Image (tube, helix red, strand yellow):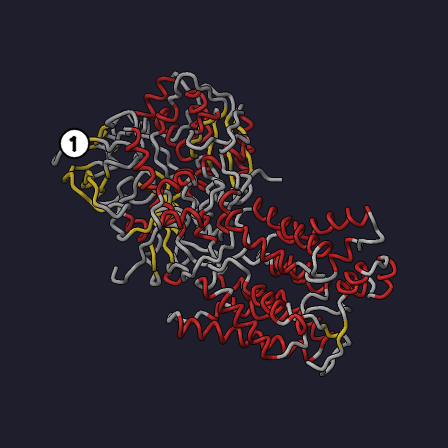
């Protein structure tokens, strides 16, 4: 029996068209727009101005607090301006815009491809390095990684969990990375283990990535303390709480964090970024991005510099298909639909999914027939039909007691609803109202 | 980009299940039952089913179009399901006009007066059935004898159901073993060779439908099994205590509407609870009330009443019986 989480879940069509496309380095864009807020927490503060010359890896915006992250230039060239640019949220946000000239890297970066296994930094130094390098959770949540590694006094972490699940349909960036950057990632995991002073790291991978599982199982023999676990193909297996439950059978209490049950979860992409930062002194300015879709000519995985407009990826994958009906930043279950191809790739961009027109429309809405399918698929044990109703009626106090804040927005309820109801839309609305109320209560 | 693209919040993919597909799966699951009924009762079964289906669809369409003034939604299949279930719950010699009245009550009172599909607290087909049972007790309890396919309709030869014979016999002080000699064997009951409402007689066909519904994931096993289990346990205890004045559990499961009710009526989405725990309570409740009515009540059969009574408790069950939330029980590894 494969390990999995105990309740709910769905199994959407996997559509991993790009699973066999090796990671290609995308040619450098002419101009990059690098948002100063690519992470959860306070936006960083630009430290460059119009006309400044920058090199690849130079810091261009500074973290403004504990929960914040530095931003580094992904190209060498001249800062054109700091201006508001449309990003994947659909809003205009401040970006540092840089015109590319050549590809000159900051001298401190080790550009060799030699594998550096020796970890010379101490745990404190590692955390500082990760903070300095602007590393955030690359699974999509973009939570600053150094925060997760700074364990508060009194908490004890005994296991590091590495998320290689990639339960989102279509996306394959983590899959390719586990196959092609395996040793770097494993050393990254060792660095994270050292930073947390734990002796055990569990890599969870969905069972549809057999090649990655067997490849890793062969290699981890040389990395004591790291184990690879195949997990049932069931969405949302990669949800943080679901993954912890599946791997170590601990339930993160409502409102608590993984570190309350002795665990920290990092994505495989983050582990690679940690390796590069700590061993090669290379800050986070590029990442693997999947460009895929049913009608895409050449579904691909690209190594992309942060700030590259999405259109460059689309062109490299054979251009925008004729029947494009929707462009999604992320996977089909939790990704955001974007309205322009000029949107820049950011630290949290794991993939761009192009949906054909016939798959872009929502299902026709009917009245709720109370079939209880939403209740049975909710991995958090909530009652989506009820939350939907309470949110529509703006019953905020009832929403709170019904557990709306426990919703992880995985979308399983909307996915499964035979009446085609936009359950998650209303639940999100209710959740944002309730979180406002909770915040005002604390003040 | 010169074409319009869609912007909407996630998720962006959907399961292909629709209300219509679910309803038509229920219809497919009922086909074996229909086939057995036609085999045993002949023309009567066809006439009753067609009348109920056509009048249910017609009333739904008329009410939506002219009273609620909205786009009729009869193609969703829910009125079709109600029509077939109403037919399954009446004898095959029931006069046409009574069936039409039953359909009007089922659709008009049972469903549309509450706002249509999804809003009715009671199972519409059962509302129609119980209305007819109370209003036309004579016609509703004259059961044609299953003779194999025949052209008889309202002129069919009638006889009592095994449950009737059992109830009367026990009332007269006869022993169960003596009564058993007068009624079909368990095996005959299993294949449906007994008097009764058109859809309740053939256990084999009902179980076939149950298997299909489970296979297509239209329903889960919880409600049917909790009902069947409760009836088996409750009647089993009574039977063990006094086998001469109580029928055996298998008799109770094979006769009357237990299987039809448990598989097709109690599992109605709209009128059953939302959580698994709730489904158990609901199923056990139906089982208990059914046996109470059968053994201690005035009616020989009580499945319809039991389901309607538990339907009334569903809002209460939904309000108080909640699924266990993730992270609710604080466990520290």
Question: Does A441 appear above or below B118?
Answer: above
Number of marks in picture:
1
Front residue of A1 and B293: B293
Residue B181 drawn at (x, y percent) = 87, 63
Front residue of A173 and A65: A65
Q: Residue furthest left?
A: A51
**Residue B225 visible in the displayed image:** no
Per the image, the residue denoted by label 1 is A48
Residue at figure coordinates x 54%, y 42% from the top left = A7
**Left or right for B24, reference A173:** right
Residue B10 drawn at (x, y percent) = 38, 50
Question: Does B257 appear above or below A222?
Answer: below
Residue at figure coordinates x 40%, y 16% from the top left = A153
Chain of the residue under the numbered disc 1 shown in the image: A
Mark 1 Cα-neighbour bin, 10 Å: few <14, some 14–19, many ≥20: some
Question: Does A129 appear above or below B119?
Answer: above
Q: Quadrant of the N terminus of chain A?
A: top right
Residue at figure coordinates x 49%, y 51% from the top left = A12
**Left or right for B253, reference A244:** right
């Amino acid at each position: 029996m494969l390990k999995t989480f105990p309740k709910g879940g769905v199994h959407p069509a996997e559509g991993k068209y790009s699973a066999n496309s090796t990671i290609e380095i995308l040619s450098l864009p002419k101009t990059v727009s690098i948002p100063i807020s690519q992470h959860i927490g306070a936006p960083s503060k630009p430290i460059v101005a119009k006309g400044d010359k920058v090199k690849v890896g130079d810091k261009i915006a500074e973290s403004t607090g504990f929960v914040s992250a530095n931003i580094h230039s992904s190209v060498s060239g001249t800062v054109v301006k700091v201006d508001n640019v449309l990003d994947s949220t659909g809003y205009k946000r401040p970006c540092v815009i840089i015109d590319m000239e050549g590809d000159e890297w900051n001298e401190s970066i080790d550009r060799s491809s030699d594998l550096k296994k020796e970890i010379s930094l101490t745990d404190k130094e590692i955390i500082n390095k990760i903070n300095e390098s602007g590393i955030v959770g690359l699974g999509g949540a973009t939570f600053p990684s150094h925060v997760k590694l700074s364990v508060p006094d009194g908490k004890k972490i005994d296991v590091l969990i590495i998320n290689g699940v990639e339960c989102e349909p279509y996306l394959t960036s983590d899959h390719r990375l586990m196959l092609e950057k395996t040793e770097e990632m494993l050393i990254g995991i060792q660095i994270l283990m050292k930073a947390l002073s734990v002796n055990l790291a569990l890599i969870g991978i969905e069972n549809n990535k057999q090649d990655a599982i067997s490849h890793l199982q062969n290699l981890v023999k040389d990395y004591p303390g790291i184990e690879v676990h195949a997990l049932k193909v069931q969405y949302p297996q990669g949800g943080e709480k679901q993954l912890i439950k599946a791997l170590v059978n601990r339930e993160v209490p409502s409102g608590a964090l993984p570190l309350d049950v002795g665990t920290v979860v990092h994505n495989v992409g983050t582990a690679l970024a940690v390796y590069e930062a700590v061993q090669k002194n290379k800050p986070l300015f590029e990442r693997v991005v999947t460009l895929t879709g049913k009608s895409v000519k050449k579904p691909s995985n690209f190594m992309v510099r942060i700030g590259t407009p999405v259109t460059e990826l689309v062109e490299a994958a054979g251009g925008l298909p004729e029947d494009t009906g929707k462009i999604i930043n992320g996977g089909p279950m939790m990704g955001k639909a974007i309205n322009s191809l000029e949107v820049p790739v950011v630290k949290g961009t794991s993939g761009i999914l192009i949906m054909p027109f016939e798959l872009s429309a929502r299902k026709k809405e009917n009245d709720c027939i109370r079939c209880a399918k939403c209740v049975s698929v909710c991995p958090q044990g909530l009652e989506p039909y009820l939350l939907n109703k309470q949110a529509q009626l703006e019953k905020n106090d009832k929403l709170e007691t019904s557990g709306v804040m426990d919703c992880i927005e995985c979308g399983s309820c909307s996915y499964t609803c035979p009446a085609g109801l936009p359950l998650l839309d209303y639940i999100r609305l209710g959740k944002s109202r309730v979180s406002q109320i909770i915040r005002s209560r604390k003040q | 980009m010169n074409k319009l693209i869609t912007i909407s919040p996630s998720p962006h993919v959907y399961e292909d299940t629709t209300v219509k597909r679910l309803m038509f799966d229920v219809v497919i699951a009922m086909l074996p039952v229909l086939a057995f009924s036609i085999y045993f009762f002949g023309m009567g079964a066809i006439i009753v089913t067609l009348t109920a289906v056509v009048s249910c669809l017609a009333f739904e369409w008329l009410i939506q179009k002219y009273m609620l003034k909205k786009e009729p939604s009869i193609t969703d299949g829910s009125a079709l399901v109600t029509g077939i279930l109403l037919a399954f719950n009446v004898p095959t010699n029931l006069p046409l006009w009574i069936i039409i009245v039953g359909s009007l009550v089922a659709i008009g009172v049972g469903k549309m007066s509450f706002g249509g599909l999804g809003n009715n607290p009671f199972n519409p087909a059962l509302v129609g059935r119980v209305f007819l049972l109370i209003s036309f007790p004579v016609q509703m309890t004259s059961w044609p004898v299953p003779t194999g396919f025949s052209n008889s309709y309202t002129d069919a030869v009638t006889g009592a159901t095994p449950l009737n014979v059992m109830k009367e016999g026990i009332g007269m002080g006869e022993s169960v073993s003596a009564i058993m000699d007068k009624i079909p064997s368990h095996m005959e009951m299993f294949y449906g060779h007994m008097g009764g409402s058109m859809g309740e007689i053939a256990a084999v066909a009902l179980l076939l439908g149950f298997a299909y519904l489970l296979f297509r994931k239209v329903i889960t096993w919880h409600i049917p099994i909790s009902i069947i289990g409760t009836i088996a346990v409750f009647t089993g205890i009574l039977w063990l205590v006094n086998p001469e004045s109580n029928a055996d559990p298998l008799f109770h499961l094979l006769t009357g509407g237990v299987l039809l009710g448990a598989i097709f009526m109690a599992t109605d989405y709209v009128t059953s609870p939302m959580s698994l725990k709730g489904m158990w309570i609901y199923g056990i409740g139906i089982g208990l009330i059914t046996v109470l009515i059968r053994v201690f009540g005035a009616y020989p059969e009580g499945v319809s009443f039991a389901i309607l009574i538990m339907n009334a408790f569903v809002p209460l069950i939904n309000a108080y019986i909640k699924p266990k939330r993730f992270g609710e029980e604080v466990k520290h590894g």
